[in-house]
């Protein structure tokens, strides 16, 4: 690898110095642009992760904004890989204040990540401008999570730690002196001519005079992702109530309206763990005061406490732009940017003074009276809504940098407030970036494609963020049920009725089926909570792409386009990808159905797979076509899979509550699985107050038999005995 730094001011000096040095060494000088200043210095901050720097890394970066602390202990439990790339084929240089990076690619190699993409999966062959923004219906890099990290099927990952609008050419540019140039073809006579010739490199442009960058190794794609997540502190572990069902109410609902909403959920016997209170709770929103509107909420503390008495949490909508009519405005104005958003000032959250003023205001008005979390809106885009790139901030942070990290800063700030009170929170956010893995927020947006929502859920697992395919409205009962099924198998089961007041029972003809899938999510609490514990402690995404599953061998397939003299004279290949199935936890494969589908294909990894509901054998390392009917979302369990469950209920359990545990086993294989538990609400688990149980299935006298061993019974909420259910006939 070569690291080169050039700019207009000193290029002549560099060239002269290089000529003199090379002359003294008896070497011939190279051109000015190829002047080598120093060899790369790679070092390992933790095993399996290598860091290098070029030029002058910026004062604010993605990792610095997140302030994540690597979980070195967990990283050290992973394999000890060698550097996974040919260092000689990695290059970095700074020219005219811009950083150019280049990483090699092999034939057949696929790349995943590079932001929260909604339509595409394998990113090789694409050009992305990683720019924080609202998703605009195109995977061009403008996204709610423009994370500059990619993971390869060759078992490595690359991260660029720059809070800039990063341009990525993911195997598209072809250099004249390419190590592996494409085959030269004549379009006139060669039917295999390609409009996009083969490229053997990822090239990255960072608009800054330096950056830090990292290479992650591993013995599999999953381990690379684990290492990336653990380097960023591990994943978040939500409170148990955060994994229940949430209903976001219409914008101008009053306290009485919300109390009636809760009563309606009870009358319909439907799960509900937290209520989302939308912008009408403010005295002014767009911009916000963060102060209660007294005609709609005359007694905020009584309102919040009344919900808590019913076991329901309140989550408040905000965007962080301060209204001139609010009491916070004159205090925080000196610590805010030069431009407004919807006439609200933008606090410079890189400054402690601004964060402390926000903290005092939010504690007094929300958290100290029992509010359990936030929905952080409008921290992503569009350009015409947020501050322009000509804006300035008192810290000296540029507008571009602030755009890339503002969602991270708001997440970190609010999460820290709850941590200081020893209360876990779980909320929603519109913008996240590298380093936010451990922060308790799930991304959402205003786009509304069911299929693309599932692709985004899958892609989120490569970049250390969580995404929810929220439900808002539907054109039919079928669509309503299909969307509700998907959202109940995601990081947050949410119905967002802010605009139209929809309810889970808005389509009475499928109310029973909607209730059943919501209840199934509640039953799966032990399984889902354990998956999140592994996310926190081991870096394994709780919902993840099939490429991260051992034994999954399918790769993207090219589908050749046809030349068309009018529509597409340069037709190229499109890609057939696995975008609509994923794993939840270690054993359950989820295959959502979409409106109008009667059948669908499912690609099964190696090993035998069984139907979740019946225990029947489905297939083994093959593509199966299923026709599941409308009532259930298709779910499959690997051979030997163990799934711990509780009885159906409408609230997540309180700390200290003991629940009866049913453990299901699928297939023929023996084996073990782990089950995690703690108090479900505090950070006492970080002090060692948690428990792991070993669930074991072994063969005794020709029959399968299950057992459970608990290491810390004082932190285990499922008693000492489990009821075992062997789903597959022996």
Image: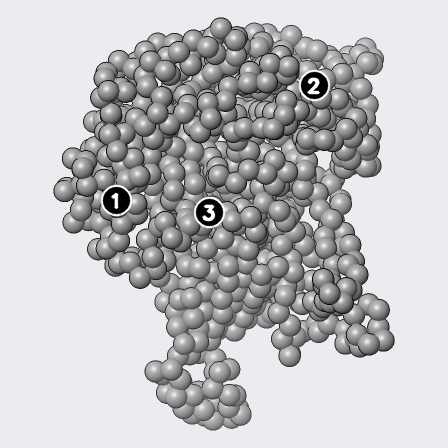
Q: Give the residue at the far front of this rendering.
A: 566
Q: Which residue is mark 2?
A: 631
* Rendered location of residue 652, percent (x, y): 48, 15
Measured Cα–Cα span from mark 1 to mark 2: 47 Å
Q: Horizontal placement of 222 versus 611: left or right?
A: left
Q: Horizontal placement of 272 versus 670: left or right?
A: left
Instruction: Tell me if label 1 and label 2 are in contact, CB under 8 Å.
Output: no
Q: How crowded is the residue under tag 2: few (<14 C-alpha within 10 Å), some, or many (20+)?
A: some
Dot 1 or dot 2: first in sequence order is 1
* Rendered location of residue 393, percent (x, y): 25, 55
Q: How is the image coloured?
A: one colour
| SS for dot 1 | strand
Q: Horizontal placement of 223 versus 11: left or right?
A: right
Residue 670 seen from this side: no
Marking on residue 344:
1
Nearest to the observer: residue 459 or residue 154? 459
| SS for dot 3 | loop
The residue located at (84%, 69%) in the rendering is 191
Marking on residue 640:
none
Dot 3 or dot 2: first in sequence order is 3
The residue located at (71%, 46%) in the rendering is 577
Q: How crowded is the residue under tag 3: few (<14 C-alpha within 10 Å), some, or many (20+)?
A: many
Marking on residue 134:
3
């Amino acid at each position: 690898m070569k690291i080169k730094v050039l700019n207009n001011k000193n290029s002549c000096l560099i060239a002269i110095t290089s000529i003199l040095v090379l002359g003294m060494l008896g070497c011939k000088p190279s051109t000015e642009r190829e002047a080598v200043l120093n060899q790369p210095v790679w070092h390992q901050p933790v095993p399996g992760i290598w860091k290098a720097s070029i030029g002058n890394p910026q004062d604010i970066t993605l990792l610095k904004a997140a302030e994540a602390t690597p979980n070195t202990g967990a990283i050290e439990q992973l394999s000890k890989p060698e550097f996974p790339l040919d260092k000689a084929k990695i290059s970095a240089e700074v020219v005219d204040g811009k950083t150019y990076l280049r990483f090699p690619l092999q034939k057949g190699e696929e790349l995943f990540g590079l932001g929260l993409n909604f339509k595409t999966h394998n990113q090789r062959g694409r050009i992305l401008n990683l720019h924080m923004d609202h998703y605009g219906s195109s995977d061009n890099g403008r996204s709610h999570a423009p994370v500059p990290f990619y993971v390869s099927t060759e078992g490595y990952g690359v991260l660029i730690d720059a809070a800039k609008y990063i341009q990525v050419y993911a195997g598209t540019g072809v250099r004249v002196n390419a190590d592996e140039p494409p085959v030269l073809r004549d379009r006139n006579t060669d039917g295999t001519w390609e409009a996009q010739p083969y490229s053997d490199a990822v090239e990255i442009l960072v608009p800054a005079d330096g950056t830090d960058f990292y290479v992650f190794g591993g013995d599999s794609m999953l381990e690379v992702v684990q290492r990336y997540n653990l380097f960023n502190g591990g994943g978040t572990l939500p409170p148990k109530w955060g994994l229940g069902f949430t209903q976001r109410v219409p914008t101008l609902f009053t306290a009485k309206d919300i109390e009636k909403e809760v009563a309606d959920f009870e009358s319909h016997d439907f799960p509900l763990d937290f209520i989302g209170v939308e912008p009408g709770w403010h005295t002014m929103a767009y911009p916000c005061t963060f102060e209660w509107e007294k005609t709609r909420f005359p007694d905020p503390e009584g309102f919040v406490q009344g919900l808590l008495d019913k076991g329901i949490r309140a989550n408040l909508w905000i965007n962080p732009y301060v209204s001139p009519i609010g009491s916070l405005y004159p205090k925080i104005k000196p610590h805010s940017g030069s431009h407004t958003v919807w006439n609200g000032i933008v606090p410079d959250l890189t400054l402690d003074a601004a964060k402390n003023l926000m903290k005092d205001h939010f504690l007094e008005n929300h958290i100290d009276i029992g509010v359990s979390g936030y929905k952080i809106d409008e921290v992503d885009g569009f350009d015409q809504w947020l501050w322009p790139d000509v804006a300035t901030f008192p810290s000296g942070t540029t507008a571009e940098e602030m755009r890339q990290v503002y969602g991270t800063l708001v997440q970190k700030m609010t999460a820290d407030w709850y941590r200081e009170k020893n209360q876990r929170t779980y909320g929603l956010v519109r913008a996240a970036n590298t380093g936010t893995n451990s922060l308790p927020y799930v991304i959402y947006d205003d786009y509304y494609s069911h299929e693309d929502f599932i692709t985004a859920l899958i892609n989120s697992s490569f970049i250390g963020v969580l995404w929810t395919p929220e439900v808002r409205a539907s054109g039919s009962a079928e669509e309503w049920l299909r969307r509700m099924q998907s959202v109940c198998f995601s990081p947050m089961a949410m119905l967002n009725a802010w605009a139209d007041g929809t309810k889970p029972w808005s389509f009475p003809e499928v109310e029973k089926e909607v209730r059943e899938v919501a209840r199934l999510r509640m039953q799966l609490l032990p399984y889902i909570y354990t998956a999140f514990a592994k996310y926190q402690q081991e870096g394994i995404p709780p919902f993840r792409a099939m490429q991260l599953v051992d034994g999954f061998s399918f790769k993207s397939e090219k589908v050749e386009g046809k030349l068309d003299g009018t529509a597409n004279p340069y037709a190229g290949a499109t890609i057939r990808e696995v975008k609509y199935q994923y794993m939840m936890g270690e054993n359950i494969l989820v295959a959502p159905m979409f409106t109008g589908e009667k059948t669908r294909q499912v690609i099964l990894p190696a090993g035998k797979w069984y139907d979740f509901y019946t225990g029947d054998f489905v297939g083994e390392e093959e593509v199966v076509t299923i026709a599941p009917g409308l009532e259930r979302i298709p779910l499959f369990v690997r051979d030997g899979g163990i799934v711990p469950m509780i009885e159906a209920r409408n609230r997540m359990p309180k700390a200290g509550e003991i629940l009866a545990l049913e453990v299901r086993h699928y297939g023929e294989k023996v084996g073990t699985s782990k089950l995690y538990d703690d108090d479900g609400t505090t950070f006492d688990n970080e002090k060692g107050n948690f428990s792991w149980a070993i669930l074991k299935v072994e063969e005794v006298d020709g029959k399968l038999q299950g057992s459970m061993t608990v290491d810390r019974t004082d932190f285990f909420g499922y008693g000492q005995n489990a009821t075992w259910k062997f789903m597959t006939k022996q």
